[in-house]
Amino acid sequence: MSLTHVPGLFMHPDKEWRSIKDEQHSVIKIILTYLIFMAAIPAICGFFGTTATGWQLPGSSDTVYLTSESAITMSTLAYLAMLASIFFIAGFVHWMARTFGSSPSFAQCLAFTAYTASPLFIAGLIGLFPSLWTAMLVGITAISWASYLLYTGLPVFMDIPFERGVIFASSVLCVALVILVATMAATVTLWNLGAGPVYT
């Protein structure tokens, strides 16, 4: 598990997936050499963007900022939610793999899920310069590339035919969407409990 695989996932994903598949994976190694760093990108950039750069809300020319305490709370919660989502999806991939004739370890599924999410992690850099329309454009691009990695990488990583891989990937994508909706619902709940944004 290494950060050096990230460029390859953008330049030659098929070759990179095979390289990743041939590595020896462990849960601890994945967490310590990849996840804790990559998942921190959106959280850290979001913190600095909301406290130093500021946002311009739609329909307003005023720049708004969050207090440091509020930004820390929201960034930490976002970081934990991202890590939890990766582990949950990896668990689903591990459980579902048997249905499609594959038997990967949980560590392999975690590695696949973490690398598939790489575009989403990197897209978090946009948080340094918050802009609603730019964030939407970058977000859509990142989701599209992550979906491409999912559909092309799953058959390779699980060593199953492409046709079955497409069905498997579609199931994973549906679970990811459910997690997204659940995260949004949890966010609203936490905001109502006092963990929402506090502006300066």
Image (cartoon, grey):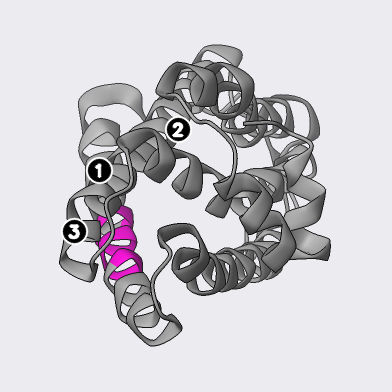
Q: CA distance from mark 1 to mark 2?
A: 20 Å
Q: Is residue 17 left or right of residue 5?
A: left
Q: Amino acid at mark 3?
A: Arg
Q: Quadrant of the N terminus?
A: top right
Q: CA distance from mark 3 to mark 1?
A: 12 Å
Looking at the image, tell me whether mark 3 or mark 2 is earlier in sequence order.
Answer: 2
Looking at the image, tell me whether mark 1 or mark 2 is earlier in sequence order.
Answer: 2
Q: Nearer the viewer, mark 3 or mark 1?
A: 3
Residue 66 versus residue 124 in the image, above or below: above
Residue 135 versus residue 106 in the image, above or below: below
**Label 2, on which residue?**
78
The residue range painted magenta reads 172-180
Q: Is residue 65 visible?
A: no
Q: Quadrant of the C terminus?
A: top right
Q: Is residue 62 visible?
A: yes
**Label 1, on which residue?**
91
Q: Amino acid at mark 1?
A: Gly
Between 131 and 198, the one nearer to me in the picture = 131
SS assignment for the magenta stretch, majority: helix
Magenta residue check for 106: no
